[in-house]
Image (cartoon, rainbow, N blue to C red):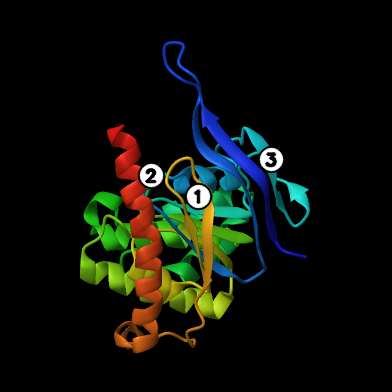
Amino acid sequence: MARLLIERVSRSFAGRRGRPPTPALEPISFDVADNDFLAILGPSGCGKSTLLRIIAGLDAPSSGRVRLDGEPVTGPGPDRGMVFQSYTLFPWLDVKANICFGLREQGMPAAEQERVAGDYVRRVGLAGFEHHLPKMLSGGMQQRTALARALANDPKILLLDEPFGALDTQTRALMQELLLGIWEADRKTVLFVTHDIDEAVFMANRVLVMTARPGRIKAVVDVPLPRPRHYTLKTSPEFAALKARLTDEVRAESIRAVEMEAR
C-alpha cells in the first residue's frame, strides 16, 4: 500500500468584499510510496505550499482527503515532520534544546532526549554548537538545526517547503548533499517543494510538475539517475536532458501564469 494518498484534494480561499472564492488547487490525486523522494515544481502561486500544508495538517482541503497509512489526516502530528524556508527555530532555545522540543512534548525521558539530540547534532555537522542560540548561527546552520529537529521525532514523512531557498548558492548545494546523505541512510519518505529545477533533478526519484493557478498535476517525471548521487552528476548529459525537459514544462506554466495576471 502507498504510504501517502492524496485523493481529489482541492483548496479555495474566500474572496474579499463579496467576490467569488479564489481557487488555489483544483482536485488532484497522486500517491507517494514508502521511502520515495518526490519533488514538486511549478510556477509561483500554483499551490505547492498549500498542498504541503494540507498534507502536514496545517490547512484543510476544500474537498478530497489525505490518507497516511490508510488513516485520514485531520491535523498536525508527529508522523509528519515539516521544514520551512524560514528557519522557525525558537530563538530563546539553544541548538540542542530546539532539537529536543518535540521529543520533550512526546514525553521522552531526558536521558533519551540527550542521546537522540546528540546523534542528530553530529549527523548534521553541528558538534560543538549544541549550546549556541539561533542568532549566533549562520543561515545554513539554522536550517541544519531545523532539519535535525524534524528528523529527531522520527516522522514517517518529511515535508520540506523551499527549505534551502534563503541560502547562498554554495551553502544550498552543501545542504542538498547533507539531506541526500541522510535520506540514503534512513530512507525516509520525502516531499520536497522547490522552485529550483537543478535541485529537484539532483535530489528526487520523481518530479511532480504543477500547472499555473489553480494548481493541477501537469506531469510526473521519473528521475532514473544512479544513487548515491555525487555533485558531479549535475554536469552529466543525463542530468542536462532531464533539466531541459522540466525547464520546458515549468516555463510554459510560468508564462501562462504571467498572462493570467495581466488580464
Tell me whether circle 1 and circle 2 mark residues in contact (CB < 8 Å): yes
Q: Position of residue 42 (x, y in %)?
A: 41, 54
Q: Which residue is mark 3?
A: 64
Q: Is 111 displayed left or right of 39 in the figure? A: right
Identify the disc placed on residue 101.
1
Q: Which residue is mark 2?
A: 90
Would you place residue 233 above or below residue 136 in this image? Answer: below
Identify the disc placed on residue 206.
none
Measured in 3D between alpha carbons, the distance from the residue under mark 3 to the one under mark 2, in whole angstroms, is: 34 Å
Q: Earlier in the sequence, mark 3 or mark 2?
A: 3
Measured in 3D between alpha carbons, the distance from the residue under mark 1 to the one under mark 3, in whole angstroms, is: 32 Å
Q: Position of residue 147 (x, y in %)?
A: 43, 61
Residue occupying the point 66% across, 35% down: 63
Q: Earlier in the sequence, mark 1 or mark 3?
A: 3
Q: Is 103 displayed left or right of 162 in the figure? A: right
Residue occupying the point 60% across, 60% down: 157
User: Which quarter of the picture shows residue 139?
Assistant: bottom left
Q: 187 and 122: which one is in front? A: 187
Q: Earlier in the sequence, mark 1 or mark 2?
A: 2
